[in-house]
Amino acid sequence: MTAFIKSFSIKKRDFVRAGEASINVQNILKSLNMDHKLIRRIAICGYEGEMNAVMHGGDGILTVEIDTGRIILDIADNGDGIENIELAMQKGYSTATEEHREMGFGAGMGLPNMKVNSDMLSVESEKGKGTHLHMEFYVSTD
Amino acid sequence: MHASADTIYSSHYVIFDADICTGCANCIKACPTKAIRLYNDNPTCLTDNCIRCGECLRVCPTGAISTTTYELEALQKDKVSITLVSPVLYSQFKGVMPNDILLAVKKIGFHHVMDLSYYIEMFLYAAEEYIAENRTTGQSPWPLISPVCPVVIRLIAYQFPNLLPHLMPIMRPISLLAKEARANISREYRIKKDAVILYHLTPCPAKTVPSRSSFAQENSLVDRTMGIKDVYAQIIGRLNQMKKTGIEALREESEPQKISGNCLLWGLSGGEIAGINSDKTLAVSGLRETITYLEKIELGLFKDIEYIEFRTCPEGCVGGALNAVDKYIAKNTVLKMLRKFGLERLIPRDKVLLLYENGWGLSDTTQDELQRIFGVYKEHISIEHLNEIEKILEQIQGKDCAACGAPDCRTFAEDVVMGKAVLNDCILLRKREIDKILENK
Ligand SMILES: Nc1ncnc2c1ncn2[C@@H]1O[C@H](COP(=O)(O)OP(=O)(O)OP(=O)(O)O)[C@@H](O)[C@H]1O
Ligand code: SF4
Ligand code: SF4
Ligand SMILES: [Mg+2]
């Protein structure tokens, strides 16, 4: 059986449309009648990743791959990249601007949240080239 | 409803009159759960998906859609009939005092009419107490969601089950009143509880059909509901009669009730949070906006808000589909009346708190029950289906024109995959085929 794969574009600094990709993914998962707690974890991860691309990164693509036992989220952007990934992964670390904070972002909790809510997270980033998040979620079969 | 039985395609809630329906597709596009289709010129509603929001009634330009409300003919047969009146009723008559409106309703033939003021205040006290408690216990996740609008509860159970723990577990005012009224009247008349017939006069499109469940939070415990617009003319008639007789002479017939400003405000979006002593509140109205906010809460936003009042009708319950008067005119009437009534509370806080501490007013419907009753999300679709749907969408390359009778291309493709529609119903595909044939000639 072939997995279902679909991609959505993300636009740098487009705060009006930000979140749409994650909501689309969420609605697809809901139509599959998947466990709603799993859906919520995936949606939260999608949203945090999407927002990071919009806010800190650049234009990008969010791809969801749905298979019977596993869901994969790939979020890639062509922004400036993350200087120090280890630091960025720490709770509370943030380079968010005053403007971002006014909109309610910048708690430095996005990446830690993704770590907690996914079953596997890898972050690849190169200064000047962009950032690529890869997250996996496993469907328990009990 | 003037159509013959076989032209009516009915579900539990929405009734279509196929003779009047012009096929404009307004309702199909407006339905938030995508429950309406117009295949083969027959408008139909997929009952399982309908959350009774009334949006389709509101957008139908020809009046081809209706919903059943109770006919008053049977009134004489009731042993004791009581009408519980939604405060929105007062917004429908400019310059008439609430107690005169209540008397006019009574004169239609009810034994008693009851206003909601006291129960709205009790609800507000209980809500404040629950919010304060939650600050220390954290038993429910922020933001708490108002349990007042039944459409919101259904929407959450149906489409956002993750948010069920956010619903504040307090019974809504109408349920509180219904419970008390039935007990008190049966005692007073020395009759059985089920001999007391409770009517509810309401603008609410969501309450017109006896509920699918008997659970407290879902069902407001009333026996029959009447839409305001269905008895509006009768009330106006009684008011005119009263004017002739002289309202003063009739006052003794009435059972004057204390009506509070909080109660009047209740029908406006924001009227609920206006009465709650927390700064971290929001009021959201309208169906689309409600869905947008629920989606955001599900993504983890608004954790810094304590309480959100949702009303799916535009401007709040004054925008309810069963009102008789334009929502903005009704809003104006309320705001003008407020100047007379003020916002002081009628009952002292301590009295309610004592009751609250004894568990009074807490809803006994569990999340699991709500989820079980409403928690189905469409039919089960598999990953293969998803791939097929995607293929069909590529083939169609459409713009959600809805000419096929489905709300959008994706839903149409879904129906095709599930065997409920045929691909040939897509006019774009048909047109391209014809173009091809013409080209080859
Ligand atoms: N896609 C990205 N491109 C460039 N820098 C990023 C990207 N994602 C994260 N960062 C950097 O990592 C930091 C931490 O990210 P994280 O999502 O944990 O917190 P935040 O976005 O600053 O705040 P919050 O997510 O709580 O609103 C960001 O402030 C930013 O400096
Ligand atoms: S009442 Fe609401 S959910 Fe039901 S068919 Fe009409 S628009 Fe759809
Ligand atoms: S907004 Fe008011 S009238 Fe409209 S569905 Fe909700 S409770 Fe009923
Ligand atoms: Mg972030």
Image (cartoon, helix red, strand yellow):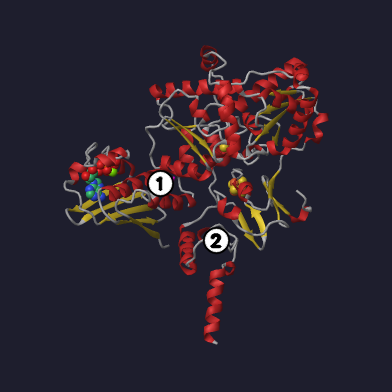
Whether A21 is drawn above or below B391: the answer is above
* Residue B337 percent location from the top left of the image: 59, 26
* Residue A124 percent location from the top left of the image: 22, 52
Q: Residue at x 65, y 34 (%)?
A: B92
Q: Residue at x 66, y 56 (%)?
A: B43
Whether B139 is drawn above or below B374: the answer is above
Identity of the amino acid at label 1? Answer: Ser
- Tag shown at residue B412: 2
User: Can residue B25 be found in the magenta stretch?
Assistant: no
* Residue B105 percent location from the top left of the image: 73, 28
User: Can residue A139 be found in the magenta stretch?
Assistant: yes
Q: Provide the major secondary structure of the magenta segment.
A: loop
* SS at circle 1: loop
Q: Crowdedness of circle 1 by 10 Å Cα count: few (<14), some, many (20+)?
A: few
Q: Which image quadrant: the C terminus of chain B?
A: bottom right
Q: Nearer the viewer, residue B101 or B431?
A: B101
Residue B249: quadrant of the picture:
top right
**Chain to which the residue tagged by mark 2 belongs:** B
Q: Nearer the viewer, residue A90 or B297?
A: B297
**Chain to which the residue tagged by mark 1 belongs:** A
Q: Is residue B332 visible?
A: yes
Residue for badge 1? A140
